[in-house]
C-alpha cells in the first residue's frame, strides 16, 4: 500500500517571477470569471479529447491522457474549484502545466471553459486575495490582479494536485474498500 | 570564475566503478605464478584513473589510498616486485574497500577511516620491501589539478648491472611542454634514428574533453629504444626539454635481470619477475576490456526517445486510417505510408534494443563470488561462463544478480562435494559450475549446472511429508525437486538435513517470477543439479490481453492468465462470508468484481452473464469478471507514478494503437485485495 510522506515544496518552482519585474500570464475563463497561470508553467494547450478514467480517484480527476508518450492526469478545474459542472463544448480546452515537486518534475492538465489572452502582470498589480473570495475556495488563489479591465485570479497550480490531497484520497478510498 | 565541479561527480563515480570492475576483472585473471605485464598495466591504469579523479574532486581519502595502491602496482609494473598471492588478495580487498568507500562518499556518508588505514598500511608494507633508496629522480612529480603521479622506484642501475640492448625512457612532459615550442613527435623521430622505437602513450591524465586546454600536453610516454645505443645520445635528445619534463632513462634489458630484493618478502613464494621485455602488442593504452566504441547515455534520454518513437508509431497509424483509397495519388500515398509504418516499427525495435545490455555485465562479477566462496568452504570450484553476449533489458539485469549469486552459493555450499569426497567418488577434485545464457524464443534462458551431489529425492520427500506438504504417494521426480522452492520447506533447519538448497529458494523463485520469469530444477543423484531460469528480454514490453468492462478497456498481463471461460451458473456459488466462488478444476477460486472495486459500469450482472478470466500469482488464483475479451497485443508499459501516483489494483498504463490510454491490471495486488475481502 502506497503512502506519501513527502511534503510538497512550493518554493521549488521551475520559473518563478522575478520580484519587481512583470511576468506573462496565460488567462482563461471558467464560469465567467477570469483566471491566470504563469505562462512559463504552461507546456501545452490542446483541445478537449476523451480521457481514460482512473479508478479510485477523486471526483475532480477526470482521468489520464497520452501526452507524447507519457501518461498525464487531467483535472476538471470546475470540479476542483467547487464550481458547477457544464457540458464540454468545442471551445473547451486542456491546459497542460508543469510543476516541480519533491519527486521531480510532473505534468498535469486542467480542463477550462476557454483560453483568452496572454497578459503582462507586474507584481505591483497583484493583491492578496480577501478572506472571502467569489465563491471560489481561496486555497487555490495566490492573488488578485486588475489588468486590462479584467479581474484576474492567479491560480496556485502547485495546490491543484498536491501530495497531501492525494494521500488523503487514498486513505478514504481504502476505507471504503475495507468496509 | 570558479568552476562547479559537482556536476562532474556523477561521471567520476560512474567511471570509478567501471574502473574498479575492470580492475577486478584483470585481478581475477592474474595468477601468482604467471605475471602478465598487460594485466598489471590495466590494473595500474584503473587505480590511476580513480586517483586522478579523486584528487581533482577533493576526495582526499580515496586519492591517498589509491596513491598507495598505485605505488605498489608501479613496483609490480616496474618489475621491482613480483606478483604473489598475498598481493592479489590485498588488491582484491582494495577493490572491495574502494567500492564501499566510493559508495559512501557518493551517498554523502562519512567514510570509516579504520579499514582504509589498515589496508593502506598493509599495502605500504608490501611495497616497502623493495622501496629503493631515493635517487633524487624518484620524487613524486606534481602535475596541475592535484593529480599525483608516482615514480617508479628510482634508478634501476643501483639494483642491477647494466646490460646493453636498449633503453627504457619514462617521459613525462610538464603540461607546458608544447607552449615552450617543443614537439614530442620530433624527439621520437630522433629516437627512432638511434634504434627501433617502441612508444607507449599514457592517456591516464587526459581530462574530460570540455576541460581540455588544447595548448597543454596531458600525455606521458613510455618509450623503449632497442639496439646498441649510447646513453649519452638518448640523453642528448631530452636535453632540450629537460626543464619541461620528468625523464627517467633506464637500461632496458636490465629490468628483466633484476636481482630479487634481499629483504625478506612476507609470506610469499619466490616467483618470477615480470618480463617487461616481452613484446608489447599495443602502442596505445587500451581502456579496460572490450567495450570499445560505446558511449554513455543516460536512461532518461533513452526513455524519452522510446516515448517519441512510440508517438511516431501512433501518428503514423492515424495517417494510415486517413489514407483511404481512390485516386492514384492516394494509393501512392498509401504505399508511402506502408513504408513509413515498416520503418517506424523497425525504429521502435532498435530504440528498445538500446536499453539492452549484455548479460556479461552481471556474469563478470560471478567468478569473484565463486572464488571467495570456494575458499571459504574449502572447495575447489571452477566456473565456466558462456553466452555472456546475450542481451537483456537493464532493469531485468539489475534484478537477476542476487538470485544468481544465491544459486551459485547454494551450488557450492551444498552441491559441490569436498575435494577428498570427490576423489573417493571418482570425480575430479575440482568441481565444475557452468553458467550459460542463450536466447530461447523471444526470451532468455540462463542455466546453472553443477557436477555435485545432486538433490536427495528421498530426504526432500520425507521432509515434505512430515510437514504435510505432500500426501500422495505417486509423485514425479520433477514435482519433488520443485518442492525445494516451497517456502514451507525452506524455512527451518533443513539446510544441513536436506542436501541443502533450502534457505531462500522460495525467495529466488519469487524474485524471478516478479520479473515475469520462471525457474525450474532438474537433478540426478550423484551427478549434479541444473537450474534453468527463463526471463523476458525486457520489462518495458509485455504481452497483454485486452478485456472489456462496461465501456472501458483494461489490459491483463498474459503471463498471469491461466484460462478464460464462460462459467455455467451452477459452478458459481456463494461461500459463507467470502463472496462469490467459482469451481475451477476441483478448486474453489474467489471471484473479484472489478466493477465494485473500480466503480466501473459493467454489463454482466452476475459472473455467469459474462466471462471469467482466471489469473494466477504466487500459486494463488482468482477469477476476474469481464464483459468481453478483445485481442492480445504487445504493450509498452508506462508509469502512472511519473505524473500522478500509484493506483490500487493498477500496475501502469499503456498507449493503444489509436493513441488512447488503457490501464494494466496489477494481478498480485488484486490477489491481495481479494484475500483481504475474503478475510473481512
Image: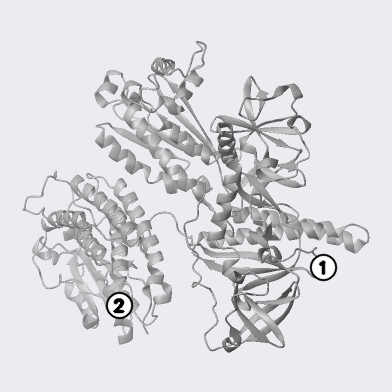
Frontmost residue, B553 versus B421: B553
Could you tell me residue B204's position as x and y percent? 33, 67
Q: Quadrant of the C terminus of chain B?
A: top right
Frontmost residue, B220 versus B61: B61
* SS class, disc 1: loop
Answer yes or no: is residue B666 visible.
no
Frontmost residue, B436 versus A129: A129
Residue at the extreme right = B327
Look at the picture and state if A124 lies above or below A72: below
* SS class, disc 2: helix
Could you tell me residue A67's position as x and y percent? 67, 62
Look at the picture and state if B256 lies above or below B578: below
For residue A78, side relative to residue B122 (left or right)? right
Inter-mark Cα distance, 2 to 1: 78 Å
Kindly identify which residue carries mark 2: B187
Number of disc labels: 2
Kindly identify which residue carries mark 1: A90
Could you tell me residue B221's position as x and y percent? 29, 70
Q: Chain of mark 2?
A: B
Discs 2 and 1 lie in a common subunit: no
Residue ID at (59%, 84%) = A126
Could you tell me residue B297's position as x and y percent? 50, 62
Residue ID at (39%, 36%) = B406
Answer yes or no: is residue A98 visible.
yes
Look at the picture and state if B224 lies above or below B377: below
Q: Quadrant of the N terminus of chain B?
A: bottom left
For residue A82, side relative to residue B124 (left or right)? right
Residue B124 figure quarter? bottom left
Asked whether the beta carbons under mark 2 and mark 1 sit within 8 Å of each other, the answer is no
Residue ID at (28%, 59%) = B44
Residue B163 figure quarter? bottom left
Residue ID at (38%, 26%) = B451
Amino acid at each position: 500500500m502506497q503512502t506519501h510522506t513527502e511534503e510538497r515544496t512550493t518554493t521549488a518552482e521551475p520559473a518563478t517571477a522575478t520580484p519587481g519585474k512583470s511576468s506573462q500570464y496565460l488567462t482563461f475563463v471558467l464560469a465567467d470569471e477570469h483566471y491566470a497561470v504563469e505562462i512559463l508553467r504552461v507546456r501545452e494547450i490542446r483541445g478537449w479529447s476523451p480521457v481514460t478514467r482512473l479508478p479510485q480517484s477523486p471526483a475532480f480527476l477526470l482521468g489520464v491522457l497520452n501526452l507524447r508518450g507519457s501518461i498525464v492526469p487531467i483535472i476538471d478545474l470546475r470540479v476542483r474549484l467547487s464550481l458547477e459542472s457544464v457540458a464540454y463544448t468545442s471551445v473547451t480546452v486542456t491546459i497542460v502545466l508543469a510543476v516541480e515537486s519533491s519527486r521531480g518534475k510532473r505534468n498535469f492538465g486542467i480542463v477550462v471553459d476557454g483560453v483568452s489572452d496572454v497578459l503582462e502582470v507586474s507584481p505591483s498589480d497583484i493583491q492578496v486575495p480577501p478572506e472571502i473570495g467569489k465563491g471560489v475556495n481561496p486555497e487555490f488563489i495566490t492573488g488578485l490582479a486588475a489588468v486590462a479591465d479584467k479581474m484576474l485570479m492567479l491560480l496556485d497550480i502547485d495546490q491543484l494536485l498536491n501530495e497531501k490531497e492525494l494521500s488523503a484520497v487514498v486513505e478514504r478510498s481504502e476505507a471504503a474498500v475495507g468496509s | 570564475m570558479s568552476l562547479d565541479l559537482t556536476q562532474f561527480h556523477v561521471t567520476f563515480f560512474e567511471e570509478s566503478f567501471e574502473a574498479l570492475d575492470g580492475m577486478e576483472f584483470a585481478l581475477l585473471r592474474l595468477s601468482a605464478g604467471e605475471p602478465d605485464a598487460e594485466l598489471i598495466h590495466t590494473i595500474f591504469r584503473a587505480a590511476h584513473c580513480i586517483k586522478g579523479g579523486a584528487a581533482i574532486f577533493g576526495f582526499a581519502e580515496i586519492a591517498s589510498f589509491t596513491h598507495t595502491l598505485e605505488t605498489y602496482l608501479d613496483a609490480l609494473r616496474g618489475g621491482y616486485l613480483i606478483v604473489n598471492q598475498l598481493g592479489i588478495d590485498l588488491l582484491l580487498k582494495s577493490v572491495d574497500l574502494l567500492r564501499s568507500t566510493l559508495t559512501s562518499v557518493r551517498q554523502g556518508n562519512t567514510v570509516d577511516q579504520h579499514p582504509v588505514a589498515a589496508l593502506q598500511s598493509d599495502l605500504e608494507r608490501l611495497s616497502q620491501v623493495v622501496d629503493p633508496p631515493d635517487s633524487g629522480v624518484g620524487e613524486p612529480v606534481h602535475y596541475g589539478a592535484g593529480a599525483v603521479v608516482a615514480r617508479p622506484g628510482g634508478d634501476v642501475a643501483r639494483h642491477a648491472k647494466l646490460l646493453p640492448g636498449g633503453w627504457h625512457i619514462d617521459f613525462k612532459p610538464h603540461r607546458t611542454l608544447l607552449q615552450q615550442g617543443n614537439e614530442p613527435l620530433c624527439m621520437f623521430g630522433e629516437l627512432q634514428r638511434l634504434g627501433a622505437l617502441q612508444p607507449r602513450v599514457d592517456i591516464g591524465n587526459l581530462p574530460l574533453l570540455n576541460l581540455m586546454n588544447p595548448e597543454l600536453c596531458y600525455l606521458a610516454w613510455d618509450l623503449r629504444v632497442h639496439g646498441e645505443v649510447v646513453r649519452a645520445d638518448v640523453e642528448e635528445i631530452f636535453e632540450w626539454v629537460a626543464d619541461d619534463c620528468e625523464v627517467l632513462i633506464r637500461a632496458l634489458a636490465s629490468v628483466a635481470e633484476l636481482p630479487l630484493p634481499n629483504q625478506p618478502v612476507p609470506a610469499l613464494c619466490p616467483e618470477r619477475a615480470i618480463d617487461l621485455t616481452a613484446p608489447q602488442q599495443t602502442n596505445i593504452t587500451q581502456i579496460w576490456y572490450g567495450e570499445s566504441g560505446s558511449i554513455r547515455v543516460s536512461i532518461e534520454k533513452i526513455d524519452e526517445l522510446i516515448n517519441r518513437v512510440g508517438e511516431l508509431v501512433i501518428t503514423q497509424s492515424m495517417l494510415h486510417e486517413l489514407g483511404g483509397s481512390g485516386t492514384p495519388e492516394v494509393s501512392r500515398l498509401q504505399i508511402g505510408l506502408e513504408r513509413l509504418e515498416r520503418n517506424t516499427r523497425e525504429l521502435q525495435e532498435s530504440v528498445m534494443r538500446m536499453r539492452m545490455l549484455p548479460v556479461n555485465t552481471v556474469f563478470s562479477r560471478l567468478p569473484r563470488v565463486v572464488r571467495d566462496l570456494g575458499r571459504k568452504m574449502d572447495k575447489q570450484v571452477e566456473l565456466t561462463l558462456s553466452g555472456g553476449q546475450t542481451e537483456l533489458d537493464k532493469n531485468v539485469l539489475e534484478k537477476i544478480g542476487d538470485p544468481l549469486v544465491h544459486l551459485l552459493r547454494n551450488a557450492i555450499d551444498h552441491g559441490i562435494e569436498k575435494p577428498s569426497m570427490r576423489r573417493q567418488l571418482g570425480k575430479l577434485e575440482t568441481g565444475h559450475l557452468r553458467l550459460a545464457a542463450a536466447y530461447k524464443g523471444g526470451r532468455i534462458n540462463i542455466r546453472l549446472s553443477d557436477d555435485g551431489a545432486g538433490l536427495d529425492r528421498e530426504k526432500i520427500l520425507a521432509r515434505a511429508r512430515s510437514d504435510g506438504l505432500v500426501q500422495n504417494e505417486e509423485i514425479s521426480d520433477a514435482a519433488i525437486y520443485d518442492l525445494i522452492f516451497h517456502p514451507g520447506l525452506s524455512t527451518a533447519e533443513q539446510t544441513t538435513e536436506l542436501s541443502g538448497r533450502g534457505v531462500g529458494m522460495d525467495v529466488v523463485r519469487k524474485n524471478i517470477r516478479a520479473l515475469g520469469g520462471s525457474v525450474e530444477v532438474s537433478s540426478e543423484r550423484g551427478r549434479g543439479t541444473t537450474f534453468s531460469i527463463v526471463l523476458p528480454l525486457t520489462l518495458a514490453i509485455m504481452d497483454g490481453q485486452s478485456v472489456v468492462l462496461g465501456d472501458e478497456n483494461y489490459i491483463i498481463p498474459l503471463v498471469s492468465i491461466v484460462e478464460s471461460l464462460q462459467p455455467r451458473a451452477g459452478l458459481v456459488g456463494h461461500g459463507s462470508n467470502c463472496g462469490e466462488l467459482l469451481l475451477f478444476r476441483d478448486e474453489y477460486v474467489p471471484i473479484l468484481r472489478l466493477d465494485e472495486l473500480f466503480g466501473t459500469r459493467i454489463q454482466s450482472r452476475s459472473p455467469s452473464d459474462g466471462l471469467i478470466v482466471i489469473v494466477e500469482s504466487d500459486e494463488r488464483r482468482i477469477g476476474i469478471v469481464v464483459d468481453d475479451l478483445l485481442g492480445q497485443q504487445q504493450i509498452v508499459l508506462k508509469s502512472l507514478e511519473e505524473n500522478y501516483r500509484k493506483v490500487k489494483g493498477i500496475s501502469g498504463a499503456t498507449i493503444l494503437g489509436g493513441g488512447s490510454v488503457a490501464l494494466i491490471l496489477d494481478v498480485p495486488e488484486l490477489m491481495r485485495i481479494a484475500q483481504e475481502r475474503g478475510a473481512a
